[in-house]
Image (cartoon, grey):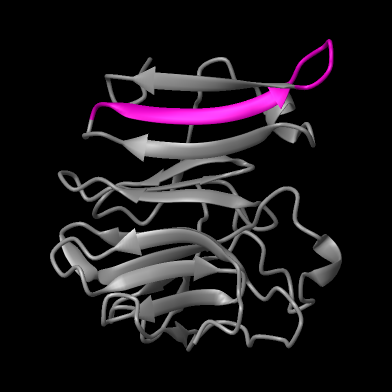
Amino acid sequence: GLMQLGVLTVVYHPTDPNIIYLGTKGGVAKSIDGGSNWTLQRTGANAVLTGKISEPIYALTLDPNNPSVVYAGVGFDIDIDTSRVASTGNSLGKVYKSLDAGTTWGEVHINPVNEAADITRGAHLRAIRIDACTGGTFVLGDKGLFRLNNGSATWERLTIPGVTQASVQNINFHYRDFLLINSNTWFLTYSEPKISGGYHGVILMTMDAGAT
């Protein structure tokens, strides 16, 4: 069962409707019978601590060309009660990858050129997407949008028009989601504070793979 863990995201297998993955406040859960039964799949991840939120998975995706490959990113809602977040090391911003449909997990290190440590560490990860045509992997978090091209070992930070590094460092600036329509057409959403108070949401679209 799910042990009353809150569900943060849902991903369906592209060809088998009985296989469903959930990103929960306690990690990745999986059903192979259409949702009747669930198991937490955390081998390779930090242990769940009773009454605590242990490595919550907000970003979750399957490789569209090989659904046995699963990516999971640690993050949570900005309004979450942080006093309940488990002290299991600095897990926020971790990216995990499974090659066996979620049975076991290993950490993916996101190290762009000239960056000594995982640049997403400590960030709230919002989305992980895989381009079905190019095989490129995208990770969106509080610290920006990153891409790993198929066959490359180096992640790159993508420039978002109109978004400065100073904006990203504002505690009230929040990336929300990233959608791949195809290799060239992407949507990205974020919210930022207004001078007059409150927030406004922004939707960006590119039709040239992020060039403009």
Residue 83: give x, y in percent of width and height.
Answer: 86, 67
Decide if residue 8 is on the left or right side of residue 32.
right
Query: Viewed as shown, does residue 160 lie left or right of 186?
Result: right
The image shows residue 108 at horizontal and vertical percentages of 46, 67
Q: Position of residue 177 (x, y in %)?
A: 49, 39
Give the number of callouts.
0
Tell me: 112 left or right of 103. right
Q: Would residue 190 be counted in the magenta stretch?
A: yes
Residue at screen point 34% across, 76% down: 35
- Residue sticking out furthest to the front: 36
Considering only vertical position in the picture, is 28 above or below 172? below
The quarter of the picture where residue 143 lies is top right
- Residue shown at 47%/43% (left/top)? 146
Q: Is residue 169 left or right of residue 204?
A: right
Identify which residue is drawn at 76% across, 76% down: 86
Picture quadrant where residue 97 is located = bottom left
Is residue 209 inside the magenta stretch?
Answer: no
Residue situated in front as seen by the camera: 109 or 46: 46
Q: Assign the C terminus to one quadrant of the image.
A: top left
The answer to whether residue 12 is above or below residue 170 is below
Which of the 4 image quadrants contains residue 14?
Answer: bottom left
**Magenta residues?**
184-198
Q: Position of residue 193 (x, y in %)?
A: 76, 22
| Residue shown at the point (27%, 82%) measured from the top left | 32
Q: Is residue 82 shown above or below 98?
A: above
